[in-house]
Amino acid sequence: MKQITIGICDDEAYFAEELYALVYTCGNEYKLDFVINTYLDAEELVTQIESKEKEYDILFLDVEMPKITGLDATRRLRATGYDGIVCFVTSHEQYALESYNLDGWGYLVKPAQYEDVKKLIKKAVIQISYRFNAEEAGKKYLEVCIQKENMTINMDQIVYIEKRRNQSVFHLDDGELVCYESLKNIFPRLNQTQFCFTHQGFIVNFDKVKEVRQGVLILGAGREIPVSRKYYMELKERKKKEIYQSKDDVVS
């Protein structure tokens, strides 16, 4: 399970610290990797998320705060596309309905009880795990239209993709597939740490590259694809780093 980041915001330090302790204890009980930050000012929290300075999987927000309420903070975040889990903390259950209207995950009534925190955390972690697994699957599989039918391709099986007139040809470990999408449209859907352009008409799975030479990539099994001057030095350095990393792994 990936590291889970949690933000807690309450203008009263006592309640913020109390909730921190409960969430921290819950993380230890479930053997989860929690990173928890507390805030006394919702404006600071919202600004950090909006600026991408911080990213949080789960937020615990006090509903009643003097500058920005937890509800107003959530409205601002949702308006900018934040889709993390938000749990409201309140002294009054009347805010429960409004919290759900803001895609709130649930709410805690002060003083928060450990069993209530556990229930929320357990439910939230299941959702985060589902999202994470879906993201990982998205890095592994590519869906394309082949002969008017959607087909899912395991990216690990792709050796390279070639532009051929108005088609894109997928050269796989065990054959070829042809689709009528441009390389420009396909590339953003590929795993960016695995695939790269070598030429305006070629995308390669760098895991398949055996050697980088001036003007050409050697892929093994007699396969070679062109490398333009624009990409040559970048690909050469990338292969060099990969070789050094492999040597370090063997030594360690």
Image (tube, helix red, strand yellow):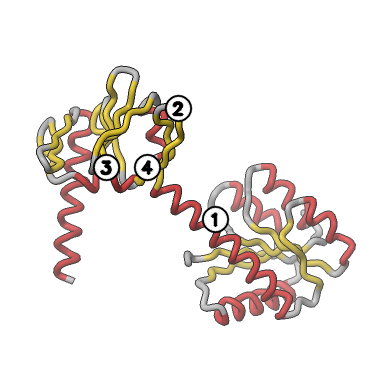
Report which residue position mark 1 lands on: 131
Residue 77 percent across, percent down from the top left: 67, 48
Q: Residue at x 69, y 69 (%)?
A: 120
- Image side of residue 68 versus residue 124, left or right: right
Amino acid type, mark 1 = Arg
Distance from Cα at disc 1 to Cα at disc 2: 29 Å
Secondary structure of the residue carrying tag 3 is strand
Residue 191 percent across, percent down from the top left: 37, 45
Quarter assignment of residue 192: top left
- Image side of residue 13 versus residue 176, left or right: right
Distance from Cα at disc 4 to Cα at disc 2: 15 Å
**Numbered mark located on residue 50 in the image:** none
Q: Residue at x 75, y 66 (%)?
A: 11
Residue 200 shows in this picture = no
Report which residue position mark 2 lands on: 148
Name the front one of labels 1 and 2. Answer: 2
Residue 19 shows in this picture = yes
Q: Nearer the viewer, residue 227 or 111?
A: 227
Q: Counting residues from the N terminus, which is met first, the one under dot 4 or under dot 2?
A: 2
Amino acid type, mark 4 = Ile
Distance from Cα at disc 3 to Cα at disc 2: 25 Å
Distance from Cα at disc 1 to Cα at disc 3: 25 Å
- Image side of residue 238 versus residue 154, left or right: left
**Numbered mark located on residue 153 in the image:** 4
Name the front one of labels 4 and 3. Answer: 4
Q: Counting residues from the N terminus, which is met first, the one under dot 3 or under dot 2?
A: 2
Q: Counting residues from the N terminus, which is met first, the one under dot 4 or under dot 1?
A: 1
Q: Counting residues from the N terminus, which is met first, the one under dot 1 or under dot 2?
A: 1
